[in-house]
Amino acid sequence: MPLPLYALTAGAFGIGVSEFVIMGLLLHVGADLGVTIATAGLLISGYALGVVLGAPILTVLTGRWPRKRVLVALMAVFTAGNLACALAPSYGALMAARILTALAHGTFFGVGSVVATGLVPAERKASAIAVMFTGLTAANVLGVPLGTWIGQQFGWRATFWSVTAVGVMALVVIAILVPRDARPSEHAEWRADMRVILRPAVLLCLLTTVLGYAGVFAVFTYIAPLLTHVGGFPESAVSPILLVFGGGLVAGNLLGGRLADRNLPATIVGTLAALGLVLALMTPGFHARPSAILLTGLLGAAGFATVAPLQIWVLSKAAGAGQSLASSVNIAAFNLGNAIGAWAGGTVIAHGVALSVVPLAAAIFPATAILVALLNMNIGRR
């Protein structure tokens, strides 16, 4: 893989740490800013909302810029957002800073996906996207635990100072390594881009993404209580087991990219089927500790094996004008799936259903995603 691709990976790593590290710092943030844990938890929802809103808006606003300039500007926004988080004097200021940071997320991965596919031959496009998204998986495996430890030892603001430093380094390597593109991104007219997004094939791709990731987060949001209350693990075991989940993310991400380069339709259906199977097996399997650990790793692998295939699929359906916008909106679709999945899992629990049944209920999402994907493939053959 070309060296500039790893500059995009560095940016993805910083964004991933910034998005997820807050989960391990909610107690510290709440205590320092005088808000409840539930209120502090809204910082996660606020970030997701920033991604969903920022992806299409910033992609349209930067549509006439060369892609390298877009990526550098987005990393500048990301860095400024994390600096604002570190300096935030109040909860409201921290929420605003989190939303500012999130604005860069969707467009960075959307435009970055287009840039990544342009750096490699056609037969390696999905693998290139997978390499870029390896930064996101590495953030979960290495960055988030390290960031959480820094926050516990030196205060939560120190974590955001560290992420700010990562943002500066990522900005520099992107500015140096990503080749200059004198041409503007392909969407010079946003109305034409929106017509691309509204194509039935593109909309069905986006719906597949939402449904697939809703299944992942319907369970992952509640993985700690599943491990402790159903699996019988002590709380001290949750972090080490989540490292297994992170290892699964890395392996699944790279495998999904390679398989998608060989046969994209089969990979989309196959990875979604694997995700549904893992979720269904978690209901009986979490009652035994060895199988609970194994299934946690497989959840990460199956969940992230879908990312590169779904991203390259929406790019293929939006071939020509509007690729950057379609790619960015698909990133927003992942985050929308996260929010819907977390809400759905919580709703199941709130209705008195046993916690162990949540994964089985979550399997409905990827099963439905397969039906939508098959419908889309059938339309494409007509």
Image (cartoon, helix red, strand yellow):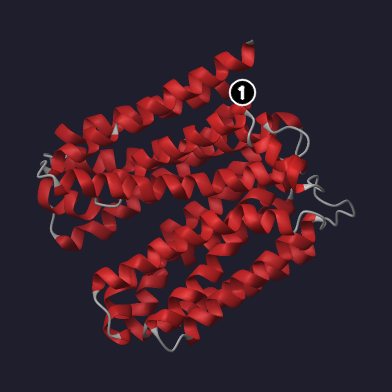
- Where is 316 relative to 358, above or below? above
- Where is 272 relative to 303, above or below? above
Question: Which residue is rendered at x = 51% and y = 76% of the image?
Answer: 97
Question: Which residue is rendered at x = 33% and y = 79% of the image?
Answer: 29
Q: Is residue 378 visible?
A: yes
**375 sits to left or right of 313:** left
- Three-letter amino acid code at the position of disc 1: Arg
Q: Position of residue 98 (x, y in %)?
A: 48, 71
Which of the two residues, 172 or 340, is positioned nearer the viewer here? 340
Q: Position of residue 295 (x, y in %)?
A: 27, 38
**198 sits to left or right of 375:** right
- Image quarter (top left, top right, bottom left or bottom right) of the C terminus: top right
Residue assigned mark 1: 262
Question: Which residue is rendered at x = 60% and y = 26% of the image?
Answer: 201
Given the current orientation, which residue lies at the most extreme top position? 382
Given the current orientation, which residue lies at the most extreme right position? 182
Q: Position of residue 163 (x, y in %)?
A: 52, 73
- Image quarter (top left, top right, bottom left or bottom right) of the N terminus: top right
**184 sits to left or right of 361:** right
Numbered circles on residues, count: 1
Question: Which residue is rendered at x = 20% and y = 41% of the image?
Answer: 292
Q: Secondary structure at mark 1?
A: helix
Given the current orientation, which residue lies at the most extreme front position? 191
Q: Is residue 232 visible?
A: no
Q: Position of residue 60 (x, y in %)?
A: 71, 54
How would you rate the neighbour count of disc 1 (Cα within 10 Å): few for under 14, some for 14-19, many for 20 or more?
few
**32 sits to left or right of 107:** left
- Where is 354 relative to 232, above or below? above
Quadrant in which residue 178 is drawn: bottom right
Quadrant in which residue 155 is drawn: bottom left
